[in-house]
Image (tube, rainbow, N blue to C red):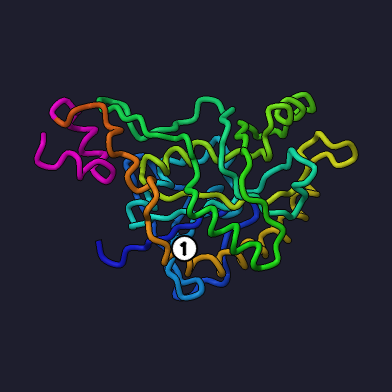
């Protein structure tokens, strides 16, 4: 494929466009899994070409459970994306993770319900390793860049993915704190799992907007979230401008790019042909000439 774009950015709540992008063009990408959240914007940020997609759609029209994460990840992969930075608004479950802080989590707990979380099935079985759900090299790079910009940033922590769209009850928030979770959001799953199946280096820049509802006098509200999001988004764009050149130059020595090696349990000879053709983008190098 010509003019492949190696870095992608998924925008979360509040980040629906990056005005600093230059040489912009927009692409409507069709996928075997339906339509992505919207057109993908291709442009240069600090002289690095990247693909940008707001996961909730322009104007924030998609609930977390309505996001077609399979189509989003597939569309970005089809454009050549190898590194994916997810920007997400989150609630804090720890006192030290205050609103406007950045968190770069290294673990996930999934409490979502019934979301399509794999590209596989229908005659092809794969089980990818997911013990480290975020690309460690990429997360470390972003955390270092954030600190270098003078942003308050925390490396590591557990992201709990809830179903939503309602925020937590106090009992749920207390339970999640007892579980040792650091932040809570609604979109990392199935995004992170699908990115791993697509062999993308995926990490999250989580922007704290509130204290969920566990902290007395600081209960989450839409007005508070929106106000904090504006400050967070400006800092997120600063971070992207600083980090993209370094991310583009970062060698892919991590396991993310080899996630499907040894993960396919179905032999090429036994794969459902229609499914194998559908998944050519992901599994072609394992099946060409073998079926």
Q: Is residue 257 magenta?
A: no
Quadrant into which the N terminus falls = bottom left
Q: Is residue 173 left or right of residue 136?
A: right
Residue 98 in the image: x percent, y percent? 77, 49
User: In this picture, is 39 found above or below 111?
Assistant: below
The span picked out in magenta is: 269-291
Residue located farthest toward the right when viewing the structure as drawn: 217
In which quadrant of the rendered view does residue 153 lie? bottom right
Q: Nearer the viewer, residue 173 or 249?
A: 249
**Looking at the rendering, which quadrant does residue 239 occupy?**
bottom right
Q: Residues within 10 Å of mark 1 (few under 14, many from 20)?
A: many
Magenta includes 288? yes
Residue positioned 30% across, 33% down in the render = 263
Q: Position of residue 250 (x, y in %)?
A: 42, 62
The answer to whether 169 is drawn above or below residue 150 in the figure is above
The residue carrying mark 1 is: 247
Residue 25, given in percent of the width and then of the height, sits at 42, 68
């Amino acid at each position: 494929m010509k003019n492949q774009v190696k870095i992608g950015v998924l925008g979360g709540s509040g980040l629906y466009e990056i005005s600093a992008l230059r040489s912009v063009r927009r692409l409507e990408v069709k996928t075997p899994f339906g339509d992505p959240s919207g057109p993908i914007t291709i442009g240069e940020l600090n002289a690095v070409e990247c693909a940008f997609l707001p996961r909730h759609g322009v104007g924030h029209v998609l609930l977390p459970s309505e996001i077609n994460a399979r189509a989003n990840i597939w569309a970005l992969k089809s454009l050549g994306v190898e590194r994916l930075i997810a920007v997400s608004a989150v609630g804090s479950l720890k006192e030290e993770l205050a609103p406007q802080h950045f968190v770069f989590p290294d673990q996930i707990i999934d409490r979502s319900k019934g979301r399509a979380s794999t590209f596989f099935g229908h005659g092809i079985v794969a089980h990818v390793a997911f013990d480290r759900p975020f690309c460690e090299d990429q997360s470390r790079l972003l955390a270092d860049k954030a600190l270098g910009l003078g942003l308050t940033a925390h490396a590591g922590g557990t992201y709990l993915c809830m179903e939503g769209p309602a925020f937590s009850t106090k009992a749920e928030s207390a339970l999640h704190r007892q579980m040792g979770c650091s932040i809570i959001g609604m979109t990392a799953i199935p995004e992170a799992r699908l990115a791993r199946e697509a062999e993308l280096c995926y990490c999250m820049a989580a922007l704290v907007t509130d204290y969920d509802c566990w902290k007395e006098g600081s209960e989450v509200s839409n007005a508070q979230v929106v106000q904090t999001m504006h400050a967070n988004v400006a800092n997120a764009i600063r971070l992207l401008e600083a980090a993209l050149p370094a991310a583009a130059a970062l060698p892919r020595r991590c396991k993310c790019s080899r996630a499907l090696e040894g993960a396919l349990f179905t032999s090429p000879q036994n794969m459902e042909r229609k499914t194998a053709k559908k998944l050519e983008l992901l599994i072609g190098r394992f099946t060409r000439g073998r079926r």
